[in-house]
Image: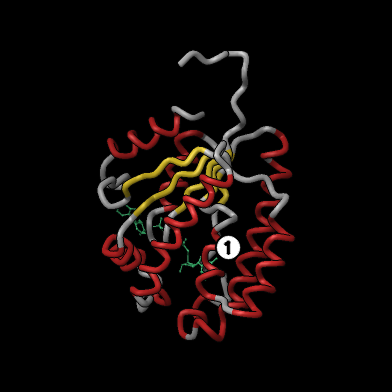
Amino acid sequence: MWEDPQVKKPCPFIAVEGAIGAGKTTLATMLAERFDFPLLKEIVEENPFLDKFYQNIEEWAFQLEMFFLCNRYKQLEDTVKNYVSRGLPVVSDYHIYKNWIFAQRTLQGDKREKYRQIYHLLTDDLPKPNVIVYIRAELATLLKRIEKRGRSFEQDIDPGYLERLIEDYETAITQIQTREPETVVITIDGNMLDFVEHPEHFEQIVAKIKEHL
Ligand SMILES: Nc1ncnc2c1ncn2[C@@H]1O[C@H](COP(=O)(O)OP(=O)(O)O)[C@@H](O)[C@H]1O
Ligand SMILES: Nc1nc2c(ncn2[C@H]2C[C@H](O)[C@@H](COP(=O)(O)O)O2)c(=O)[nH]1
C-alpha cells in the first residue's frame, strides 16, 4: 500500500497489557530500553491495600480500586504534561482501562456504580495509548510467572479469579478495538513467545511494533 511520506504518524504512546503475571512490566521495560522511550511503570510494592485485598477481596476491593485509580490518574496526568502533549513518545506497563477491567470483576452494586462514575469523570478526557501490546497468556503460564515473581501476597491467588481475569481481558481488548478502531492492537502469544529467554522472540515483537511506528 502506498503511503504519503508527508503524512506524519502520531507520536507513539505504547501501553503493554495482559493479565496478572503475563509479562507486562518485563516487556515494557525491554521496549523502553530498545526504543529509548521513557517508561511509565506501575508502583506495586508500596500499595498498602494489596495484601489485605488478597486476604479478603469483598472487604478491601473499593479502597484498592480507588487507590489504583488515583495513582494512575496522577501518573498519567504527569505523563501527558511531560511527554504526550509535547509530542514525545512513551511506553507504559498499563492502559488506564485496566482500572475498569478489575473494578467490574471486584466491585458490586452501589460501590461499583460510584466507582464507575468517578472512573469516567477522571479518565474520559485523558489521551489514550495509540498502540496496545496485548500479551495473551493462559492460566498455567500466569501461575508459573506469579510463582517466579515471588510476591508473598500473590502466592495464594485463587486460580478462578485469574481465569475470570483472562476472560475479562479478552472482552476488554475487543471492546477497545470496537470503540477506538484507530488504536493499533498487537496481540502476542505469551505462552509461546518467551522474550526473556529468547532474544529472537523479542526481536519478533520489536519488528511487529516497528510496522506501526
Ligand atoms: N516471557 C517470559 N518468559 C519467562 N518469564 C517471564 C516472561 N515474562 C515475564 N517473566 C517473568 O514472570 C514474572 C512476571 O512478569 P511481570 O513482567 O512482572 O508480569 P506483569 O507485569 O504482567 O504482572 C517475572 O518474574 C518475570 O521475570
Ligand atoms: N484489584 C486490582 N488489582 C490490581 C490492579 N492493578 C494491579 N492489580 C494487582 C494485580 C497484581 O497482584 C499486582 C500487580 O499487577 P500486575 O498486573 O502488574 O501484575 O496488583 C487493579 O486495578 N485492581
* Residue of label 1: 99
Measured as percent of width and height from the top left, residue 144 is found at 28, 64
- Residue drawn where x is 58% and y is 63% of the image: 100
Ligand 1 location (quadrant): bottom left
Q: Is mark 1 within 8 Å of ligand 2?
A: yes
Q: How many marks?
A: 1
- Residue drawn where x is 54% and y is 43% of the image: 91
Q: Quadrant of the N terminus?
A: top left
Measured as percent of width and height from the top left, residue 41 is found at 54, 53
Q: Is residue 100 above or below residue 12?
A: below
- Residue drawn where x is 38% and y is 76% of the image: 157
On screen, residue 122 versus residue 36, left or right, reads right
On screen, residue 64 versus residue 158, left or right, reads right
Describe the element under mark 1 as helix, strand or loop. helix
Measured as percent of width and height from the top left, residue 166 is found at 39, 62
Q: Is residue 3 above or below residue 162?
A: above
**Label 1 Cα neighbours within 10 Å, binned few <14 / some 14-19 / many ≥20:** some
Kindly give the residue lying farthest to the front in the view shown. 178
Measured as percent of width and height from the top left, residue 81 is found at 73, 44
- Residue drawn where x is 44% and y is 27% of the image: 211
Of the residues shown, which amino acid type is indicated by label 1? Answer: Asn
On screen, residue 140 versus residue 80, left or right, reads left
